[in-house]
Image (cartoon, rainbow, N blue to C red):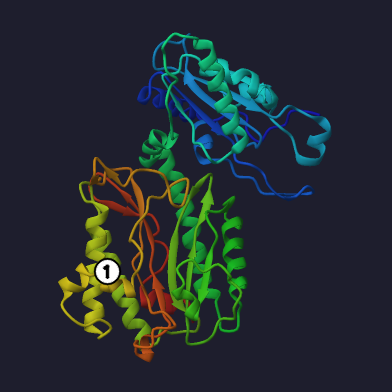
């Protein structure tokens, strides 16, 4: 069988990431198991997605693999050495499951300094850990690999004898890799921008096509189809397609009820393009128009979101943006009689959480809730160029809240965009997804 690969080479920035990683943690060894294949029974394979850190540092997309990034003694301090453990070439298995890169492909295509078959990992791992000042490996996700790492360290301990030396500490690799992934390069921004364009187009299509009588799962299929036909490999997360009262459930997943005229539909869906995901939420009428009450609530949320986006610039902090969102929503809720009392007291006692129970933002990148610290040294970190996060204020009147007037009852609204911090302010990467009432209603004709 010929070695026909999807890739003939990988971009140079993958190697540069490994170099940077070792510069940030000299003397350390980083260990990354691949994600497991999705097997629901022995005969059925489901789509595989590589673990994000593994992909970020290697571009290698096969299951049953293991990545080691460590210093290279032959190239001098700060230079990286990549060791890949991969599945062996197997003509019979490849006939059923598709071709593999094997050790040759791992070296030639992905630039591995060394490549071995995965069955050699238990024998070679102890030697790879020798001399490490610190080991970065996330315990608790892969029992079989946890056992291998512990056994390799036990071999190290025995080899030390009575030297008095201690074993190196084990730390979560996100401690270092997460900080790298938080700041998007120009190449990463280009991938995110494409994911956002694909997602915005899908939301716009949904606005045009949704009609009373459709089922939520039909809309989900429509969104997924739009993603795939534009080149997205997969969804970034399970889509939320929530009509009527279902929109008040923050993580609604059933997506199986009939849409009714007069209700709103909330769609929270994002395409993943080359391992970078968008995250857009839009809320719009199932029929042709917002009702008066829906329009009042929607305008309140949209105003709040615009104010939050305008605050985004280097030096700002996410808690400050969230505080502004909450205060603006309280103003609106007070004006509509949904809250009563003193604004400052409502904020202090979190009375607004009856209608807005979640935070305003989360980091975004390879994962929809991306890695990266929100606080450093006990303080909320300041925003810097290259960071990407969501801004997603909302309003939710729960079905059981009988104190809410009927025009505002059983309504969920969320408006979410993906924001890139730039040197001079910010860029809304998802601006192509309509959110003005006039623009949405114009699509419903």
Residue 216 drawn at (x, y percent): 58, 74
Q: Residues within 10 Å of mark 1 (few under 14, many from 20)?
A: many
Taking depth in this image into account, of 119 and 106 the one nearest to the observer is: 119
Name which residue lies at 23% across and 74% down. Answer: 330
Residue 58 drawn at (x, y percent): 53, 31
Q: Is residue 113 visible in the rendered structure shown here?
A: no
Against 402, residue 224 (above or below) is: above
Q: Is residue 180 left or right of residue 12?
A: left
Residue 246 drawn at (x, y percent): 50, 76
Q: Is residue 262 left or right of residue 351?
A: right
Against 23, residue 4 (above or below) is: below
Against 424, residue 179 (above or below) is: above
Q: As drawn, which residue projects farthest toward the bottom?
A: 406
Quadrant occupied by the N terminus: top right
Secondary structure beneath dot 1 equals: helix
Name which residue lies at 28% across and 52% down. Answer: 426
Q: Which residue is tagged 1?
A: 304
Q: Is residue 371 left or right of residue 382?
A: right
Against 62, residue 325 (above or below) is: below
Q: As drawn, which residue projects farthest toward the right?
A: 92
Q: Is residue 365 visible in the rendered structure shown here?
A: yes
Taking depth in this image into account, of 357 and 210 the one nearest to the observer is: 357
Name which residue lies at 57% across and 52% down. Answer: 232
Q: As drawn, which residue projects farthest toward the front?
A: 162
Name which residue lies at 35% across and 77% down. Answer: 298
Residue 52 drawn at (x, y percent): 51, 41
């Amino acid at each position: 069988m010929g070695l026909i690969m999807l890739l003939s080479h990988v971009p140079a920035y993958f190697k540069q990431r490994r170099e940077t990683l070792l510069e940030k943690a000299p003397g350390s060894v980083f260990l990354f198991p691949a994600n497991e294949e999705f097997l629901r029974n022995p005969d059925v394979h489901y789509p595989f997605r590589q673990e994000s850190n593994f992909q970020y540092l290697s571009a290698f997309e096969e299951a049953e693999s293991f990545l080691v990034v460590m210093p290279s003694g032959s190239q001098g301090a700060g230079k990286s050495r990549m060791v890949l453990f991969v599945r062996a070439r197997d003509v019979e298995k490849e006939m059923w499951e598709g071709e593999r890169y094997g050790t040759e492909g791992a070296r030639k295509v992905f630039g591995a300094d060394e490549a071995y078959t995965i069955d050699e990992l238990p024998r070679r791992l102890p030697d790879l850990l020798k001399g490490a000042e610190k080991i970065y490996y996330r315990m608790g996700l892969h029992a079989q690999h946890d056992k291998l790492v512990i056994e390799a360290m036990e071999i190290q301990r025995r080899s030390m004898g009575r030297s008095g030396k201690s074993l190196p500490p084990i730390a979560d690799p996100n401690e270092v890799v997460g900080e790298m992934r938080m700041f998007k390069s120009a190449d990463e921004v280009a991938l995110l921008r494409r994911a956002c364009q694909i997602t915005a187009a899908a939301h716009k299509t949904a606005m045009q096509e949704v009609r009373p009588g459709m089922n939520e799962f039909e809309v989900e299929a429509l969104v997924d189809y739009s993603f795939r036909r534009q080149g997205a490999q997969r969804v970034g997360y399970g889509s939320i397609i929530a009509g009527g009262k279902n929109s008040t459930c923050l993580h609604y997943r059933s997506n199986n009820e009939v849409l009714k005229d007069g209700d709103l539909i909330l769609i929270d869906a994002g395409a993943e393009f080359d391992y970078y995901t968008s995250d857009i939420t839009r809320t719009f009428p199932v029929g042709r128009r917002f009702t008066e009450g829906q329009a009042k609530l929607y305008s309140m949320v949209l105003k709040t979101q615009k104010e939050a986006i305008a605050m985004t610039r280097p030096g700002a902090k996410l808690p400050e943006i969230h505080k502004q969102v909450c205060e603006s929503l309280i103003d609106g809720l007070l004006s509509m009689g949904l809250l009563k009392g003193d604004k400052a007291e409502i904020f202090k006692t979190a009375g607004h959480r009856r209608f807005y129970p979640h935070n305003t933002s989360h980091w975004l990148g390879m994962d929809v809730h991306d890695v990266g610290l929100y606080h450093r040294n006990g303080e909320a970190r300041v925003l810097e160029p290259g960071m990407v996060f969501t801004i997603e204020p909302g309003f939710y009147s729960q079905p059981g809240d009988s104190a809410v007037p009927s025009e505002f009852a059983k309504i969920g609204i969320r408006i979410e965009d993906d924001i890139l911090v730039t040197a001079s302010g910010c860029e809304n990467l998802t601006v192509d997804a309509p959110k003005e009432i006039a623009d949405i209603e114009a699509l419903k004709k």
